[in-house]
Image (cartoon, rainbow, N blue to C red):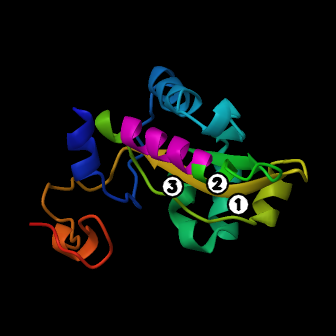
Amino acid sequence: MEVYQAVTTLLAVREFQKKPVSETLVNKIIESARLTGSSMNLQPWHFILIRNRGTLVKIGELVTSGKYTAQANFAIAVATEKSSQFAISDASRAIQSMMLTAWSEGVGSNWTGWVGMTKVANLLGIPKNLDVIAVVPFGYPKKIHTKGIKNRKSLKEIVHAEEFGKSLS
């Protein structure tokens, strides 16, 4: 799948098959995050790969927006260095890289949670100088989604020419 096709078809997946994701593909997904650019090349992130079913279930209980994490084949918790002013934007780029890489290989995902997930951090033994900004569950989608179900604002609503308020020609 080409990058643009992955971007235009990526959907949030909240139901997963029990089908395992290969070790090779899991590594490819993580590698895409590692290779993502970061401000000043600081790479202010850490990725915690979670496969243990009990831990996935517990995270599903702790992250109210991500109860379906319990069904995922695996999840990746993303922790950022609190001292880095660019950490959240840099890690967000890495998360998008993982999600697009997974999607291009037929694996679905969805970003759950946000900054300050103290209970998840404690569960995973994450040090106090790091902040968990996301848990991303991954797995093969239970339902087959089709192209064209995205509902997005038009370009005219969100893109301005030269200055705010001037519409594109």
Residue drawn 40% across the image and 52% down it: 16
3D distance between C-alphas at marks 3 and 2: 27 Å
- The residue furthest right is 128
Callout 3: few (<14), some (14-19), or many (20+) C-alpha neighbours within 10 Å? many
What secondary structure is the magenta-colored segment mainly? helix
* Residue identified by numbered label 2: 88
Left or right, 151 with reference to 61 = left
Per the image, the residue denoted by label 1 is 58
Q: Secondary structure at mark 2?
A: helix
* Of residues 142 and 39, the one drawn nearer to the viewer in this rendering: 39
- Up-down: is 154 above or below 120? below
Please tell me how crowded label 1 is: few (under 14), some (14-19), or many (20+) other residues with Cα within 10 Å.
some
Residue 25 at x, y percent in the picture: 44, 26
2 left or right, relative to 88: left
Does the magenta segment cover residue 131? no
Q: Position of residue 59 (x, y in %)?
A: 68, 60
Viewer-proximal residue among 146 and 39? 39
* Distance from the alpha carbon under mark 1 to that under mark 2: 24 Å
Q: Secondary structure at mark 3?
A: helix
The amino acid on which the numbered mark 2 sits, given as a three-letter code, is Ile
Quarter of the image with the N terminus in it: top left
Which region shows up in magenta?
90-102
Q: Is residue 106 visible?
A: no
Residue 58 horizontal/vertical position (percent): 70, 60
Q: In the drawing, what numbered circle is on residue 71?
A: 3
